[in-house]
Image (cartoon, rainbow, N blue to C red):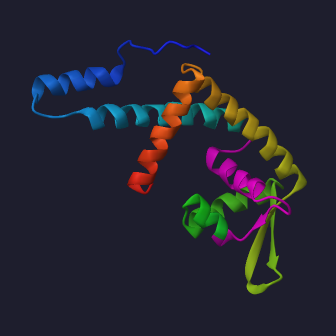
Amino acid sequence: MNHSAGTGKDPVDAIVDQWAAARPDLDTTAMEVFGRVSRLSRTVGDRMEKAYARFGISRGEFDVLATLRRSGPPYTLSPRQLSATLMLTTGGMTGRLDKLERADLLRRSPDPHDRRGLQVTLTDEGLRLADEAVVAGLAVQTEALSHLNEEQAGQLAGLLRVLVRGTGA
């Protein structure tokens, strides 16, 4: 890990400097934080998308497989549970489920406890792929964090947790 604090300028600094010249009355602290969070999210998200593409899935499709995988044996949830966990509409979920089912990564079956309901279950291939893809995605995230030491990474995680809780995100 690179243990330097990284004191060089970044693209957000240029934007903040421009605002300081144009509107010196503004406090741009929030812009500095969320501009960087946005850039990181976009950059790391794009890298993760490429990592998952090697497995023939998108980031959104990985999210479905990972949610089922994390649920534990028998790796089964209802479409409603998946939609709620992933904050997706049922329509958005249906498209993902269709593609993943065609790829034999999951199967849909009637819910034995609710005649109107369905269950979504990982197949053996879906379980294997989820386990491989999560390692690939974590490698991308770990590489991004390599610019921080362990203490800095822990501090950042804690501060972001405070923000997430405070904003209800």
Where are the magenta residues, as a range?
Answer: 56-80
Residue in view at x 72 percent, y 56 percent? 99
Q: Is residue 120 left or right of residue 140?
A: right
**In the image, 92: left or right of 66?**
left
Query: Does residue 55 show up?
Result: no
Q: Residue at x 64, y 61 (%)?
A: 95
Q: Position of residue 102 (x, y in %)?
A: 79, 57
Frontmost residue, 60 versus 162:
162
The C terminus is located in which quarter? bottom left
Q: Residue at x 49, y 36 (%)?
A: 41
Q: Is residue 168 above or below residue 114?
A: above
Q: Position of residue 11 (x, y in %)?
A: 34, 21
Q: Quadrant of residue 36?
A: top left
Residue 32 versus residue 124: which sits nearer the camera?
A: 32
Determine which quarter of the picture holds residue 70.
bottom right
Q: Is residue 95 left or right of residue 158?
A: right
